[in-house]
Image (tube, grey):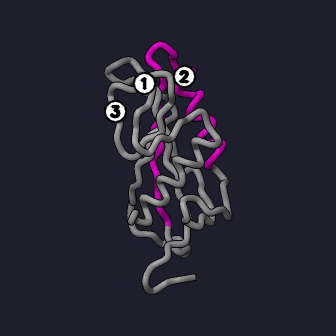
Amino acid sequence: MASWTEDLLVGLAEYLAAHTPGVWKPNGGYSASEAAIVLGWSPPELDQLIILTPYQPGPDDSGTDTVQHVQVKCRGAADGGLASVLALRDPVLDALHGLAWVHIGGVRIQQIRHQSGVELPGVDQSNRHETTDNYRAQAVRMSAYRTE
């Protein structure tokens, strides 16, 4: 049985695969030409990546049921320059920012908002451009004591 956070991340991966150039394969096996969507890790052998990582920046005082922060790191192809990473980052931003009142991975999302991002992309050791953006997902988190 998956955890609530894993359900959310897998749901986001599936959603992004349907709305961006990213490809989600839960068991891996990506080809070199695919923009892989992965959870929490950065396989060095793949150029194009969308990496989803959950994090909590501090206490939640939003007044909503729960807030889960998700960092989305995009990496472009080494030979694609800046355009390669922006071709991943921009569709992710368009797909997630403002998304509201949907079920994703069995999690009821009230709203997802873009929080912050790197203004200028960086370059990794293999000369691949990268961007990092942070999203804030307000959601309903069911538990043994909360069922609605």
| Closer-to-camera residue (94/20) | 20
| Kind of element beneath mark 3 | loop
- Range of magenta residues: 67-96
Tag 2 near tag 1, CB within 8 Å: yes
Q: Residue at x 50, y 41 (%)?
A: 24
The residue singled out by tag 1 in the image is: 47
Other residues around mark 1 within 10 Å, as few (<14) / some (14–19) / many (≥20): many
Q: Earlier in the sequence, mark 2 or mark 3?
A: 3
Other residues around mark 3 within 10 Å, as few (<14) / some (14–19) / many (≥20): few
Q: Is residue 132 visible?
A: no
Q: Position of residue 50 (x, y in %)?
A: 48, 37
Q: CA distance from mark 2 to mark 1?
A: 10 Å
Q: Residue at x 50, y 70 (%)?
A: 66
- The N terminus: image quadrant: bottom left
Q: Position of residue 137 (x, y in %)?
A: 54, 60
Q: Residue at x 47, y 27 (%)?
A: 48
What is the number of the mark on residue 84?
2
Q: CA distance from mark 2 to mark 3?
A: 17 Å
| Kind of element beneath mark 1 | loop
Q: Dividing the picture into quarters, in which one does residue 91 lie?
A: top right
Tag 1 near tag 3, CB within 8 Å: no
What is the number of the mark on residue 43?
3
Other residues around mark 2 within 10 Å, as few (<14) / some (14–19) / many (≥20): many
- On screen, 65 above or below 122? below
- What's the residue type where badge 1 is placed? Asp
- On screen, 35 above or below 143? above
Q: CA distance from mark 1 to mark 3?
A: 9 Å
